[in-house]
Image (tube, grey):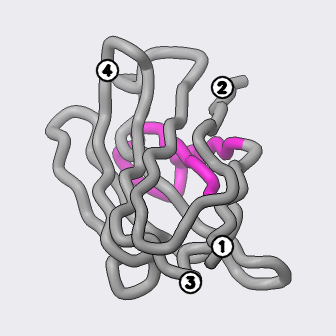
Amino acid sequence: QVQLVELGGGLVQGGGSLRLSCTASRSIQNFGTMGWYRQAPGAQRELGGTIITDSGRTDQTDSVMGRLTVSKDKAKNAVYLQINSLKPENTGVYLCFARTRALNPIYGRTYWGQGTLVTLSS
């Protein structure tokens, strides 16, 4: 089984910035897509951003998660989520995912990290 470990959460001030990391137990080149979801207490998970592991192409959802950037470091088996200008709505558990490659996406497998909590304070 693939393990994904997220780090970098905590209590942070609004207006600041934060960088979350997701480290995989194997090369991220084994995956086609990796990315991040946010989950507020009692709420559905919301897709924040994704990255194509080979090309580095990214897609962010700023309207939901604020100003953010997804990046990667293949040498470290890691992907990152940079959040700038932190706002109260950025509060939540951030979960990393990794999707395996498949010719037909329905046969792909998705792995999830345990999540890291980000809490905004005034």
Q: What is the spatial separation of the Cα atoms under label 2 and label 1, in whole angstroms?
A: 34 Å
Of labels 1 and 4, earlier in sequence is: 4
**Foreground tag (2 vs 1):** 1
> Are the residues at dot 3 and dot 2 in contact (C-beta closer than 8 Å)?
no
Q: Which residue is mark 3?
A: 89
Residue type at numbered disc 3? Glu
Q: Which residue is mark 1?
A: 121
Coordinates of residue 89 in the picture (x, y in percent): 56, 84
Disc 3 to disc 2, C-alpha distance: 30 Å
- Residue on which disc 4 sits: 74
Give me the C-alpha separation between circle 2 and circle 4. 16 Å
Give the secondary structure at mark 2. loop
Asked whether 81 or 97 is in front, the reply is 81
Residue 64 location in percent, x, y? 44, 84
The three-letter code of the residue at mark 1 reads: Ser
- Quarter holding the C terminus is bottom right
Compute the Cα span from label 1 to label 4.
33 Å
> Which residue sits at x=38%, y=46%?
33
Q: Secondary structure at mark 4?
A: helix
Cα distance, mark 4 to mark 3? 30 Å
The magenta region covers 94-113
Q: Please, what secondary structure does the residue beneath circle 3 have?
A: helix
Residue 109 placement: quadrant = top right
- How packed mark 4 is, by other alpha carbons closer than 10 Å (few <14, some 14-19, many 20 or more), is some
Q: Sort mark 3 into few (<14), some (14-19) or many (20+) by Cα contacts within 10 Å.
A: few
* Contact (Cβ within 8 Å) of mark 2 with mark 1: no
On screen, residue 45 versus residue 97, left or right, reads right
Q: Which residue is mark 2?
A: 2
Give the structural element (helix, strand or loop) at label 1: strand
